[in-house]
Image (cartoon, rainbow, N blue to C red):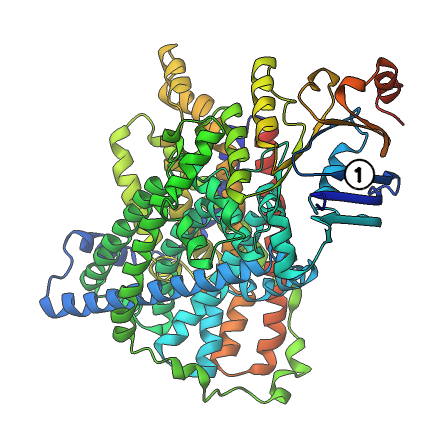
Amino acid sequence: MNPAAWLLLPGLVLLPVLLLLPLALHGGGWSLIGGFLAAAVQPSLDPALLAASGRGLAVTLAVALWSWLLSLVLGLAAGLLSAPLVVAELCGQRWPALVLRRLLALPRSLHELLWGLLLLQGLGLQAGVAILAIALPYGALVARVVSDQVEALDPGPLRALRTAGSPAWAALLQALGPPLLPGVLSYGGYRLECALRSATLLGVFGLGGIGADLRLSLQSLQFREAWTSLWLLGLAMLLLETLVALLRRRWLLPGASVGRRGRELLLAGAVLAVLLLPAGHLLGLDGRCLLGPWSWPAPTDLWTNAGWRQPWPALVGSTVGLTLLATALAVAAGPWLVLLLRPWPRLLLPLQALGLLARLLPPPLTALLLLFICRPGVLPAALALAFHNAGVLGRLLLEQLAAQDPRPEQALRSAGAGPRRALLQAAFPAVARTYLAYGAYRGDVILRETVVVGLVGAGGLGVVLLEALSSFAWGDVVPVLLVYAGLTLAGESLADGCRRRLLLAREVG
Amino acid sequence: MEPLLELRDIALAGRDGRPRLQQLSLQLHAGERVALLGPSGAGKSSLLAVANGLLSPQAGSVLWDGVPAGRGRRRQRQQAAIGTLWQDLRLVEELSVQQNLNAGRLAAWSWPQVLLNLLLPLETDACRQVLARVELDPGLLPVPVTALSGGQRQRVALGRLLRQGARLLLADEPLAQLDPPLAARLLQLLLQLGSAPRGLLLSLHRPDLLAGFDRVLGLRQGQLLWDTVPAAVTAEQLEALYAGGSGP
């Protein structure tokens, strides 16, 4: 089958969704939705509110910066120590790396929101909680990417330098550092964007920043105030994405000299390090808070037999169902919209703006808006998750399409094919595999994110977990946490398998 | 004077358990340029890997300058005196010519110098001299090695050995991928660099390039068949060496 057809296939999921949607609508709040959309062009410009929103944004940015840098440091260290090639050079054995690799699966199996709530119980409400909550799972994710990249490197230069008498660490740095750098830079930039989204999301759940402002103004139906925050956040996100793309282009240019790039990187690192200080001051960070006092539950509370009596099939089933539905919708949205709007290139800009809105609006808030017109259930939860992730996936699709060689499509156009047919026959097949591979990875992210839309009655493991955590029902927390972690790990290896097969087929084909 | 390299009764087993080298002994003194001749699969790469310390033999001993392999810092100093020109060169592709040349200094450098090599052009004069010795234009110093031709890359790899200060030069089939005029020029350069106080052990599978070497070793199925001067190699000896294709 033509890979372009795979791009459109997930769109089939729209049929049942469109059939079920009328049943789920209650129609009570269309005027509210209208009010929300109308407020987009008239955000509140009240100076006091602007100042408060600006401060909220600064807090969110500070949390994002700290957690991102911490996750990079943790992730690089853990990634190198879980790469057999590196560990074998340092201590002569491969197994410590393999053990660490397995252990790192645990921190990344939990969504940052769950980490946030767990740490909140232990440490109390403070800025350090949000930072750690993001840095721990992100660090484990970075570690996996780094160690995978190290394993994919050619060990030849390393062996050559070692045989020439170089000490282990110097050979590792010179032989593996430069080839590792582009991948780490590219992935690191992407993680910064993710960190901003996560910091906003944690705010929605009470950990401070602009997310908290957004939730408050949406819940009190102050849409003009909400849009003040949204515009600020959108501006920040746009600036950040542009900056990251700019640096990525500059530093990943093939043939760029490592020396010059290294000096610029050092400079960038110094700037970031200087920024950490005011950011830490703004958050009132205090390293001593990590030392305690910790308030953990008694071990006897953690393990109760009653906690294991849950309706497991229903919980797991609805989590998986929600994930599949949201993933299919998120993957389908981009290609179908691009295809439909192809004859009118001017509509690309509004489409990009919609994508930006999707990325910056945290899924629980989208779900909250959907509840104005929708009955609680799986559908609004899936739509909210799909909207957010379609924004992330859509940007990738547009970037890929823009980077394609335009000549095949032009050739088809000049042979008389319509704009949609030319796109379908020329550009889509070229981008399909990479896009779908990223879609598989996104499915893995969505599975973890099912927790954050528990509010709207989607059911599943996430809701039980959130309720148990907020009511200190530790006997329920532990079993659900274990099952949830097992499920996300299974999902991760499934998504990995899909991705590898898609990308492998691209190289062979 | 102690030989640069001495192998005594070396035995090395392959991954499949079959012997790759057996009962192998040889000495190489400073100033000697030795060709290692044999069909593919004879064990030439294994012999070079034992000689540069990459592989440890199951039996026998390896001595560099009359001293067996040490540990830690001492081993690193011993390794620094051995320079290997790898068949696949093993340059760090992302670095410039100068950075790759300087990678040969890692054994001698302190850690600030190692870090700085990734940021700044270091010891430019020494690098220029090395480039001149391997007959490359000093203007290539800031160029990324990916932008060079195959022959230029080989010379950069050779320059890295000179920066390293290696006295024992080992080269694994360096002429295999080159067309005849280029191969002849590189061989001249290697022979020149391999003269005293250095020594050269170079593996070949073609017997037509032996002129200029001081000794020739014939290796077949992991054993030395003969060890003689190039002029004394007979057609019968070559025939015995290559008989029956590449061995079992």
The residue lying toward the viewer, choosing from A274 and B169, is B169
Q: Vertically, is A120 above or below A277? A: below
Q: x, y (%) of residue A262?
A: 37, 49
Q: Vertically, is A56 above or below A1? A: below
Q: x, y (%) of residue A312?
A: 65, 67
Residue in the image at 43% along x and 56% along y: A380
Query: Amino acid under label 1?
Result: Leu
Which chain contains the residue that carries disc 1?
B
Q: x, y (%) of residue A165?
A: 60, 50
Q: Vertically, is A337 above or below B59? A: above
Q: x, y (%) of residue B68?
A: 74, 54
Q: Tell me: B21 left or right of B180.
A: right
Count of numbered badges drawn on the protein: 1
Residue in the image at 38% along x and 71% along y: A205
Q: Vertically, is B127 above or below B107? A: above
Q: Could you tell me if residue A439 is visible in this image?
A: no
Quadrant location of the C terminus of chain A in the rendered image: top right
Count neighbours of disc 1 (C-alpha within 10 A) and say few if under 14, some if 14 to 19, many if 20 or more. some
Residue in the image at 42% along x and 54% along y: B113
Query: SS of the residue at dot 1?
Result: strand
Q: Quadrant of residue A307?
A: bottom right
Q: Tell me: A194 left or right of A227.
A: right
Q: Outermost residue, front direction?
A: B1
